[in-house]
Image: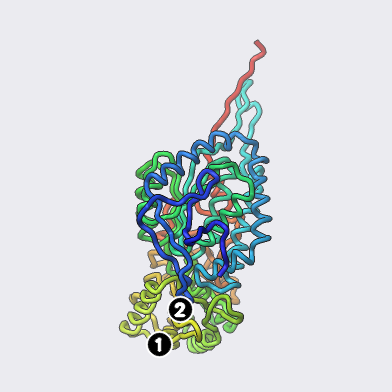
Amino acid sequence: MVELDSLGEADTVRNYVGGDWVTPESDEELVTTDPATGEELGRVPFSSTDDVDDAVRTANDAFEDWSGRPVEERIQPLFELKSLLEENLEELAEILVQDHGKTRAEARGELRRGIENVEVACGIPSMMQSGTLLNAAPEIDESAVRKPLGTFAAITPFNFPGMIPLWFLPYAVATGNSFILKPSEQDPLVTQKLFELIDEAGFPDGVVQLVNGGKDTVNALIDHDGIEGISFVGSTPIAKLVYERAAANGKRVQAQGGAKNHIVVTETADLEFAAEKTVSSACACAGERCLANDVVLVEESVYDEFADLVVAEAEAQTVGYGLDDGTDIGSLISEEHETTVRNYIQTGIEEGATMLRDGRDASVDGYDEGNFVGPTVFGDVTEDMVISQEEIFGPVLALDAVESVDAAIERMNASQFGNAASLFTGSGADAQKFRHQAEIGNIGVNVGTSAPMAFFHFGGWKDSFFGDLHAQGEDMIQFYTDKAIYIERWPDA
């Protein structure tokens, strides 16, 4: 196991407040384990209201100086952080695999996406510029400027512990705010290493801080008068609660929720390519991602052929320990979540879906304690079935035949979610129709997983997102600042 400098003798996860590593003063804690081996990795004490108070007070004190520094000075620690992330990428990836369960390649890819956000935030001097109009009125010039607001907090999920904090942190501090991260308590070790690098990058004490904990810690941040805004990523029911509670407290809120994403395959598609990308989309990261496209609607004329290709592709996937060479699909985050995924599979069987490939018998030699489920493929999954409607967060695919692209779009748009969708086709007309009519925030054409680059915002519509401004890109500048107008007159007298 990778050893972390910031962990004490008892492998106790700690907070990072005011430039120091501190242990929360709480009797409540969670033991974290490697989901593939069952090995105990660390203990996570939960931060109390007093711990949160200390962090917020320290962050607000730091904001006084940080917000007044030149923007070019504020981005220098981000340049250093990018360099440190690059230098430590392999160690971070190994920690991530042990802590979360995904494969080494997936961990590297996740961290690369996080680094992209640091790179984009280094361009804040240009991104924060607004406008000036000379002689807007007689003898009057007007200017629009963006100003930081104070301390922001982000509450991030277990499925991308290395990437999602970096959707928010770089933009918050580059625009002149202080920032507090509350990561998932299920896999906090990669965050510990990330904050070691943040400490080394040279941010002033209190500008970037870490508090660990559970529900009570989250509520303390949401309710705290010293927090200007909340960023959240998680399930839809919790995202909605966070949005409503934080907004009621007068805070800015962006809350990314769950999903039930669709792929549409037309008869003009490259079916082998589409099958490969479909299985990758649904089963990579063991299906534990909000961009997993796990409902596949296929034109009737090619349904049987495509289903056979998907099953063959699923059979070719190797389930195993994420640090072992050749592993395609790693373990699920916990035994509890493995049970949830298995229950969904049983529900699909009871609802009458056709089992085309059963992944419940997945076993990995030498890892009897691991939380493994292999790629599972259902056919004839109708719109009213639970496995067609609810987010499973596991490597489970649901296929069904449709008469046309129009029918597929109608069915897709009927979902309460609107996070992502992809179309596989050789028809430009179908692609244009899909782009125009899909009620979805992230749309892919001949792309399995429609994950936007860091310089674009992360989409999400309907019950997949609550708020106005999304993560990443230009939306982050607007979320972390407010605009002011300067109206000036200097008469000769």
**Point 37% across, 79% down: residue:** 342
For the point 53% across and 70% down, the residue is 98
How many numbered marks does the figure carry?
A: 2
Residue 75 appears anywhere in the view: yes
Q: Residue furthest front?
A: 9
| Residue at numbered disc 2 | 370
Tell me the element at label 2: loop
- The colour mode here is rainbow
- x, y (%) of residue 153? 47, 48
Q: Is residue 14 left or right of residue 349?
A: right
Tell me residue 118's x, y (percent): 62, 53
Can residue 302 be seen in this snapshot?
A: no
- Looking at the image, is 227 positioned above or below residue 305? above
Nearer to us in this view, 66 or 31 = 31
Q: Residues within 10 Å of mark 2 (few under 14, many from 20)?
A: many
- Of residues 198 and 480, the one nearer the viewer is 198
The quadrant the N terminus occupies is bottom right
Image quarter where the C terminus lies is: top right
The label on residue 355 is 1
Q: Residue furthest top?
A: 493
Residue 155: x and y, percent? 45, 54
User: What amino acid type should be assigned to the residue bearing mark 1?
Assistant: Met
